[in-house]
Amino acid sequence: MKRRVAFVLAAVCAVGLLPAAGAAAESPFRGLDPEPWEPYADHGFSVPAGYVCSFPLKATPLEQDMIKRVLERHPDGAVELEEYKGPLVVEYENTDTGATVVRDVGGHGFPRYRNDGRLERYTAIGPVAFGMREGDDHPKGFWIVDGYHVVEFAEDGTRSFSVENGTKENVCEALGD
């Protein structure tokens, strides 16, 4: 039942539907008071060899029009749950060889944060991307996932997929691993 409610919430958010005030009793947004949308810019990243791939990986946004908003705050005012959506096309590069691939990762994401600001869970309706490292409860790589996925972040920082419903591609393999 919890999974169904979470999926319904995510599906409603994915199509951008927000209930009218009079429909709040039936809404999966009941109890939430979303803050206004604001622009979000992805700045890409570079990670060293061995972090997620056997080679240094660089990500460069090519096209984006992302927005985000806060859905919930902790009692002290810190962000607890956010929502991200919008187009995002990224070029991934194996900087050792110069090989590149371009992927759409402009899905819909819902990161949930602990009181101290560290990630607790990331719920995604893909396509989105996740890096998995040595020691995580999933094969190491930089994964583009499509469909409905949930990544859990343990207290010790390890990551695992608690829900995997859809496809996955390891960009490291596409670039030479």
Image (cartoon, rainbow, N blue to C red):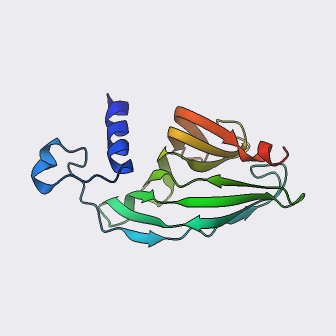
Q: Is residue 112 above or below residue 44?
A: above
Q: Residue at x 79, y 49 (%)?
A: 53
Q: Residue at x 32, y 45 (%)?
A: 12
In the image: residue 7, left or right of residue 158: left
Which corner quadrant holds the C terminus?
top right
Residue 78 is at least partly visible in this image: yes
Residue most extreme to the left: 22
In the image: residue 35, left or right of residue 85: left
The picture places residue 45, in percent across and down from the top left corner, at 68, 65
Q: Quadrant of residue 114?
A: bottom left
The picture places residue 107, in percent across and down from the top left corner, at 50, 51
- Counting every numbered tag in the picture gives 0
Residue most extreme to the top: 1
Q: Quadrant of residue 91?
A: bottom right
The picture places residue 56, in percent across and down from the top left corner, at 82, 58
The picture places residue 99, in percent across and down from the top left corner, at 84, 56
Which of these two is toward me, 6 or 159? 6
Q: Residue at x 55, y 41 (%)?
A: 146
Residue 136 is at least partly visible in this image: no
Which of these two is toward me, 78 or 12? 12
Q: Is residue 154 above or below residue 63?
A: above
Which corner quadrant holds the N terminus?
top left
In the image: residue 49, left or right of residue 37: right
